[in-house]
Image (spheres, rainbow, N blue to C red):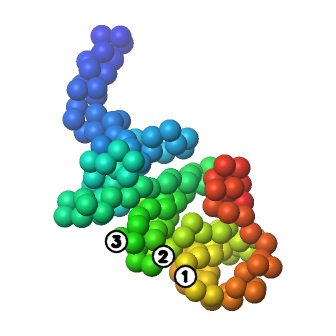
Amino acid sequence: MKKLLLPVIVFLLSNPLFSQQNSLNAVASLLFKDIKTTLTPADKNQIATKLNFVLSGHQNEPFAQDKDSKEYPFTATVYPTDLNKDSKDEIFIVFGNSYTSGATGSSVALFIKNAAGVYTDNLGFPGMAPDILSTTYQGYPDLLIGGPGFEFPVWRWNGKTYTFYKMVKEATYIKLKKMTLEEVSKSGKQ
């Protein structure tokens, strides 16, 4: 039995497909540095690839939107959460600057693993780090995404993705029961 197992292990470890799934690409390595998450290296690489970031070459702002915009570098903050309590991480990424995100100055992406096991981006537009509201629909909390102005969009899970639900005026926003994305990410709950 041991004689058969050793060649299989050697084959797996030397197989390029196996090694790609267990090592991080350059963007994923920086993006997920010091982030505690249940994601596999393949999951992290998948998310990094879908973001289409490139390395800017700047130490404090390591990312750029593409190779032609390296003179507009930015940072990205990763927030692992478990919004629906299924023990699988959903990943928020808040990133950007006025070049990538206009007057808001940042964009927000939310990656949720679908039934096929693929992480898909459910937001991916200019906005600030969302507030996680106490209201839920189909197992996921509503998200309020701030930005410039006096009305804020609320996004609701429809069973497959987050979609626009309604606008909330600033006076109503102040009264809502909510947690910040940072609080939810640190606590592991909502």
The numbered mark at residue 99 is 3
Sequence-first tag of 2 and 3 = 3
Q: Position of residue 42 (x, y in %)?
A: 37, 45
The amino acid beneath tag 3 is Tyr
Q: Residues within 10 Å of mark 1 (few under 14, many from 20)?
A: few
The numbered mark at residue 148 is 1
Q: What distance separates the C-alpha of mark 2 from that of mark 1?
A: 6 Å
Q: Relative to residue 61, is residue 112 drawn left or right?
A: right
The amino acid beneath tag 1 is Pro
Secondary structure type for disc 3: helix
Look at the picture and state if 56 lies above or below 145.
above
Residue designated by label 2: 104
Sequence-first tag of 2 and 1 = 2
Q: Are marks 2 and 1 in contact (CB under 8 Å)?
A: yes
The amino acid beneath tag 2 is Thr
Picture residue at 22% right of the left edge, 31% below the top:
15
Screen quadrant of the C terminus: bottom right
The numbered mark at residue 4 is none
Q: What distance separates the C-alpha of mark 2 from that of mark 3?
A: 10 Å
Picture residue at 46% right of the left edge, 71% below the top:
105
Q: What distance separates the C-alpha of mark 1 from that of mark 3?
A: 16 Å
Q: Relative to residue 85, is residue 15 drawn left or right?
A: left
Q: Position of residue 79 (x, y in %)?
A: 55, 54
Q: Say if residue 53 shows up in the picture.
A: no
Q: Residues within 10 Å of mark 3 (few under 14, many from 20)?
A: some
In terms of image quadrants, where is residue 149? bottom right
Front-most of residues 101 and 1: 101
Picture residue at 68% right of the left edge, 56% below the top:
184
